[in-house]
Image (cartoon, rainbow, N blue to C red):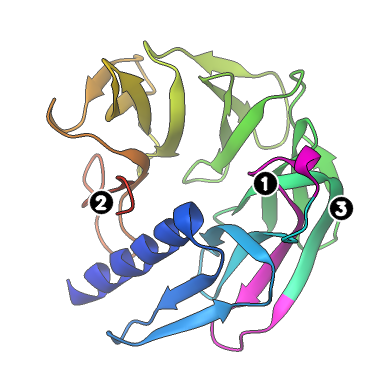
Amino acid sequence: MIRGILWLLAIVVLLQVACSETNIIDAERILPAEVTLVSDGWDNLQPAWLPDGSGVVYVARPKSAPSALGRERGLFIRRVDRDARTIRELVADSTGVAYPAVSPDGLSLVFCAGDAIRIFDLHDQSMRQVSDEDGDELLPRWSPDGETLAYLWRGRLRLRSAVGGPAATFEAPDSIRAFCWLPDGSGWLYSARRNGTVALFQLQRNNGQVMRVPSNEVIGDWPAAGAPPPAVHSVIGLQILFHYGTS
């Protein structure tokens, strides 16, 4: 119970950093200690845990980055080890990179680069493109079993096999802002603007059913469902983590 709470606090810190700060910090499992993982004069964005919790991947952009790069993109994807604090460069791309995520088996890195989604093999250093839309792909995310990639394309949720193939589109009644997989792979949590407010919704994979989570009074953005193993997940995880304002 305590371990699960501390993990969630660490995720909260990472989420807040992604939204409002330029350094990556890690709330240690023994609170209230707080240690800076990366503070190197760069803007360090969009941190994502490695599956085993041993480190973080993130996007690095120079503070003097050209405006053509856009606010959400950097020039490098780097990895920092949680304990050793060593930093390794994984990907460099002058067209801009964003939204890195490591596969559940820890072998592959998916990210946005240029006008496509690409997968980088962390073992043999090979790279391949997995999307074929005409740009605007965002937020690639691995399914819990690592077999499927979900991502946003012009506000719609699209799915592709991680080994390639055609994309399938899941329609929602709203333009999706951000999303995450449910821990059991049965669907997704997403945020969207409805009636002037940003709210959270659940989309079922088997029937496309959408419902607001958990009630009409809750508003929020950038959801993350579930808790780290070995916790047992309910249908939508033990808790829902989301961004609201600066919290």
173 in relation to 105, above or below: above
Mark 3 lies on residue: 126
Q: Nearer the viewer, residue 15 or 152?
A: 15
Specify the amino acid type for callout 1. Ala
Task: Decide if residue 31 is on the left or right side of residue 140.
Answer: left
Provide the secondary structure element on which disc 2 rests.
loop
Image quadrant in which the N terminus is located: bottom left
Residue 127 x %, y %? 84, 47
Residue 225 x %, y %? 32, 46
Provide the secondary structure element on which disc 3 rests.
loop
Task: Decide if residue 64 is on the left or right side of residue 222.
Answer: right
* Residue at 44% in and 17% down: 175
Image-quadrant location for residue 9: bottom left
Residue 82: image tag: none
| Structural crowding at the residue carrying mark 1, measured as other residues with C-alpha within 10 Å and reported as few (<14), some (14–19) or many (≥20) | many
* Residue at 45% in and 29% down: 177
Image-quadrant location for residue 79: bottom right
Provide the secondary structure element on which disc 1 rests.
strand
Name which of mark 1 and mark 2 comes first in the sequence.
1
| Chain part drawn in magenta | 66-87
Residue 98: image tag: 1
Q: Is residue 80 magenta?
A: yes
Specify the amino acid type for callout 3. Ser
* Residue at 46% in and 52% down: 19
Residue 233: image tag: 2
Q: Nearer the viewer, residue 124 or 127?
A: 127
Residue 16 shows up from this direction: yes
Name which of mark 2 and mark 3 comes first in the sequence.
3
